[in-house]
Amino acid sequence: MPLQPVRIGLIGCGRIGRVHALSVTAAPGAVLTTVVDAVPAAAESLGELHGARVAATPAEVLASADVDAVIIASPTATHVDLIDAAIDAGKPALCEKPIDLDIARVEALRGKASAATTPIMLGFNRRFDPHFATLHARVAAGEIGRLEQLSIISRDPAPAPTDYLAVSGGIFRDMTIHDFDMARHFVPDVVSVFASGTAQFSEDIRGLGDYDSAVVVLTGREGQQVTITNSRHAAYGYDQRLEAFGSEGLLEAGNVTDTVVRRWTADAVEVREPYQNFFLERYAAAYQRELAAFVAAIREDAPVPVGFHDGWAALVLADAAARSAAEGRVVEVDLDA
Amino acid sequence: MPLQPVRIGLIGCGRIGRVHALSVTAAPGAVLTTVVDAVPAAAESLGELHGARVAATPAEVLASADVDAVIIASPTATHVDLIDAAIDAGKPALCEKPIDLDIARVEALRGKASAATTPIMLGFNRRFDPHFATLHARVAAGEIGRLEQLSIISRDPAPAPTDYLAVSGGIFRDMTIHDFDMARHFVPDVVSVFASGTAQFSEDIRGLGDYDSAVVVLTGREGQQVTITNSRHAAYGYDQRLEAFGSEGLLEAGNVTDTVVRRWTADAVEVREPYQNFFLERYAAAYQRELAAFVAAIREDAPVPVGFHDGWAALVLADAAARSAAEGRVVEVDLDA
Amino acid sequence: MPLQPVRIGLIGCGRIGRVHALSVTAAPGAVLTTVVDAVPAAAESLGELHGARVAATPAEVLASADVDAVIIASPTATHVDLIDAAIDAGKPALCEKPIDLDIARVEALRGKASAATTPIMLGFNRRFDPHFATLHARVAAGEIGRLEQLSIISRDPAPAPTDYLAVSGGIFRDMTIHDFDMARHFVPDVVSVFASGTAQFSEDIRGLGDYDSAVVVLTGREGQQVTITNSRHAAYGYDQRLEAFGSEGLLEAGNVTDTVVRRWTADAVEVREPYQNFFLERYAAAYQRELAAFVAAIREDAPVPVGFHDGWAALVLADAAARSAAEGRVVEVDLDA
Amino acid sequence: MPLQPVRIGLIGCGRIGRVHALSVTAAPGAVLTTVVDAVPAAAESLGELHGARVAATPAEVLASADVDAVIIASPTATHVDLIDAAIDAGKPALCEKPIDLDIARVEALRGKASAATTPIMLGFNRRFDPHFATLHARVAAGEIGRLEQLSIISRDPAPAPTDYLAVSGGIFRDMTIHDFDMARHFVPDVVSVFASGTAQFSEDIRGLGDYDSAVVVLTGREGQQVTITNSRHAAYGYDQRLEAFGSEGLLEAGNVTDTVVRRWTADAVEVREPYQNFFLERYAAAYQRELAAFVAAIREDAPVPVGFHDGWAALVLADAAARSAAEGRVVEVDLDA
């Protein structure tokens, strides 16, 4: 007997919610049945597009008999309560990162989340990017021996609007959070954090007391070194790279273009296409594979590949980075606590 | 009112038929309703996989009320008759290349095919490869000025079985046929053909009186030069490249890998992943886009992007190449005839 | 006892003569003692620059006691007589290509040249380019198994002045001549030639009855295929590439830049430096290594690496190409004759 | 009147001394007249090779009438005294890095060195590498706008012998010292240092209390961030790279090969040649250009491009890095002191 598709309720119909709706519709094993948003018009238009019912509240979604699992793509401040409610409702949830900007709120839910049998998956999509996933698999297979140094370069094309940045929690919680998770994907047992932040080019960001440029050095339990380089802008587009150095070699995943076409003209030679820009394009496949992993975990009753603990750990590292940058010293962390 | 999906009947359930079945199932605007194959078991297993009915004969498929269009993926020798029947049935057809190995049979149908209003599309899938299509579009947009020289490199990983090669029509009709169409995609008005073939490494191929290596030089009406380089083997995998040289520059499409990961180890540096191997992998996207183009032409009542004339022209060039290689001289062709 | 430097007399102080003068001065084992040119001022200024005596005639150079060997860099029409005189004088000669534009004059000297014990070296500098020489050595070492197909791409940045082209002997004797020699460097036993030439972009060249674009296909005794692609212009600079395909792989030598620096900006990513432009820059190292090979052959009483026979063979191929292009047929050649 | 060559006395005939001797002999404007070494046989063999007189002591070299300038390539512990003596003798000196491992000894000479009119140049050869120098010049020319982040990757093929490492002063003073100078070449006004060191793979190095892996983050006065990544080993060879990120783009200088040849075989595609290995090969051109710059500064009575202050500053940064790594905190520096 063929498996029934997993019926998905989507909470939050903004930009990232619409990405998830598309992934659900395209996935062979999932179907979007219900949507909800604080802005009813957003829910209605998305529901119409995908043939999904519009619910009045997230609670209604969680209580629906035709919803097997939910995707939480609503504002960050709602995540903790919705995860809590999903656990109570026994509905598997895929929640966008971060869990919350306030570690205290995350800590408060941590015991319950770790005890829960309901799958709670965190939306660290980059783990599912085919390029990074392949690099990770090849490191895991021992192709470069023992991993010693990892370099993560992550630069946005341009800063988000200042209004957004003002409530973003700062560069470490908003932007580097992805890189902290990627670091832990390779080196789970991070024991210390050093971070340096400067505001070099944006008066707006400086005015917020935030950084537009950051470098982070993480140290693993066995001495591994992870370097993260961030900038809120990059003239040449979205810059997303990994470089893993091990005792027997190096693996690199550079930037991605749509095709392999290159050009030679009088002004420039060997020019590749512009990079995929921005995260919706660059990580389109990652979002689809993330959803597939969520569906597979539900169907196979298997652990989710990225869980609540990972969301908590990334936030612990972000908080430590903020403190390190402010105090000019290494901050030790205990991710086994 | 949303468009109804185009209901497809598939004639031929071999390797390439199964590729088309997958494309149809994945396409938003098409549905596979009927399949047929000379080997009933092949049709039955594919029909079951895709939820399609099994017909007894191609004629039954063409006569079915729930078949809006057909894909002809049966052996080459059946193509002419099936195209003929599709025209009679008024059913749009996407037919695998080549139309036939015998130009006389193709000529016999040519008048009828060109007069027909039923869309007849030829399966020159490489035109739809995203890399080559992008390169073509950029040439067409004038990025390198006037096109002066085009280099097509096309090498298979290894020769097909000798049994297959014995009835393949020879390297020019079997393998180079794709490159002839690609040449005409850039330079439609080819006026002369020179070809050189040698059997350098395969005693089997030499025994068949065929070539395992070939170089072809085509000349366009305005003096453009197209060079095709073929080999029936390549130690490093499927080698599929284009290089377009124009008055203002050059565009290149090199080989394709699944990801951008590269490695550095003691034995080799900057090593990319193995190339996508073989055509089912390398041209997976091309087959899907080809099907999408067929469906779009039907729905929009628009001309098919590759038609019977193109299938005929490729075969004319293949015949001319065989003659040129045998006689050691340039063979003129008239593709406007 | 350290070896005495080889004392060089330079016949011809034009552009290429000045390159050779520089090579001699820079070489540890050679010294420029004498120069001569039909234009006395040219000889005088070059002589002053390098501290060399100015002779009145080539014959005086050949007769000089302080000249151990000569470099013939005078106009092509003088080469045959000067080689002849160098043999008579027993002075080793490095002669610029081509030996002559008229094969009959070359044939007339051939017997004497092949019988001579005086080293006569032909200036096919590209054999000495470090990139091409390395590729050649790796092919010779068997790294890609048996060589099956060789692609030579050779495009100039822009056409030479029409006055020059008018007396150049045509594209095959003037430009492709280098590629014919490179072809023979890999596949000495060429047995047939096909050539296609068109005038696509230059009305001047068309007016001369010459071609601005050419494709040549050479066939080796064992079926190897060599493709040469020429253009008299290239918007992106001097395009000089080799690609050797063998039974076990492929080796490529692409274009050369001064440094490995690449740039990423808003308009273009992964842009390399402009290519070295033109032959004086691109082949600077080749000229020096060529001179070193000449000096080494003299000192070690060893055969020159490129001799009169090679100069003759290249011209035979050029003539065959001209005939092939005119007649639209393969022209057979016998380089063992 | 042509310039007389600068007559050079070489103090120290070990590995790096021999490199300098070669550079002097190859330079048009310099001649090696005198050599000296604590091991007389070393001086004698090098003197014989280059036709230079052997002196008994460095003092004799400095006092020689036929010595216009000296190169100090003796052990590090002798540098301070020899620079001091060179100033007293009024003889320009090119001194190998570091000035000393003990900042106190460097400080003691600092006032005298900065007041001296005798050119004292420090041997930070990498500034003269053509690739890095080109990248630096393009940054300086504004090609990528304002420099915001610089990444320096520097990995040795394998650790030096433990005996050497034991007296090397530690990774920051011995290896990173080059990178500190490169950092200052781009961002002279470094204001703070963070360093992280671990011993991940070498028990020997761990036993010395030293690090085999290091990451350093420097901050410039205007917030620029420089990241240095070091390892004492790299399976794929000498890894020497720069990446400069600015407000308008990025410039990269990757690793260097002898030729542009790449290979494709069954086991690996697009493989470049092994990297130039080790510093004598990779920086061969840099040593020659460094010598040329020294000679030019003497002849033109111009400031040396890298002076005593730079040697001092690099050591200040190395000391700060050692302290930072030990204490887990940012160390502020004042390079204007």
Image: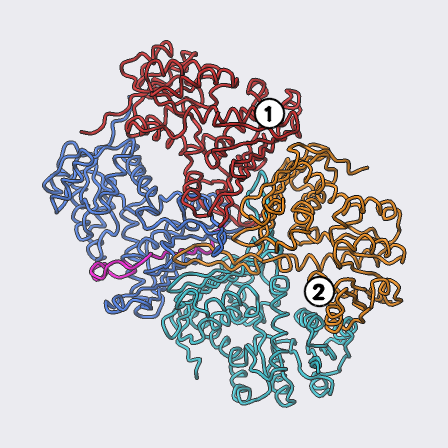
Chain colours: A red, B blue, C cyan, D orange
- Name the residue beneath numbered marker 1: A322
User: In the picture shown, does residue A70 fall above or below B104?
Assistant: above
- Residue A191 as seen in the image, left or right of residue B27: right
Letter of the chain that mark 1 sits on in the rendering: A
What type is the residue that disc 2 sits on?
Arg
Report x, y in % for residue C77.
Answer: 61, 79
- Name the residue beneath numbered marker 2: D18
Report x, y in % for residue A335.
Answer: 49, 27
Placement of the N terminus of chain D among the 4 image quadrants:
bottom right
Placement of the C terminus of chain D among the 4 image quadrants:
top right
Q: Is residue D23 visible?
A: yes
- Residue C98 as seen in the image, left or right of residue A21: right
- Residue C163 as seen in the image, left or right of residue B304: right
Letter of the chain that mark 2 sits on in the rendering: D
The CA distance from mark 2 to mark 1 is: 51 Å
Q: Is label 2 in a helix, a strand or a loop? A: helix
Q: In the image, what residue occupies the spot 48% across and 75% down?
A: C319
Q: Which mark is residue B105?
A: none
Which residues lie in the magenta part? B146-173
Magenta stretch contains residue C175 = no
User: In the picture shown, does residue C273 fall above or below A237?
Assistant: below
Q: Is residue D252 visible?
A: no
The quarter of the displayed image where residue C56 is located: bottom right
The quarter of the displayed image where residue B293 is located: top left
- In the image, B111 versus D316, the foreground residue is D316
User: In the picture shown, does residue A257 fall above or below C18?
Assistant: above
Q: Is label 1 in a helix, a strand or a loop? A: helix
- Residue A254 as seen in the image, left or right of residue D282: left
Are discs 2 and 1 less than 8 Å apart at CB?
A: no
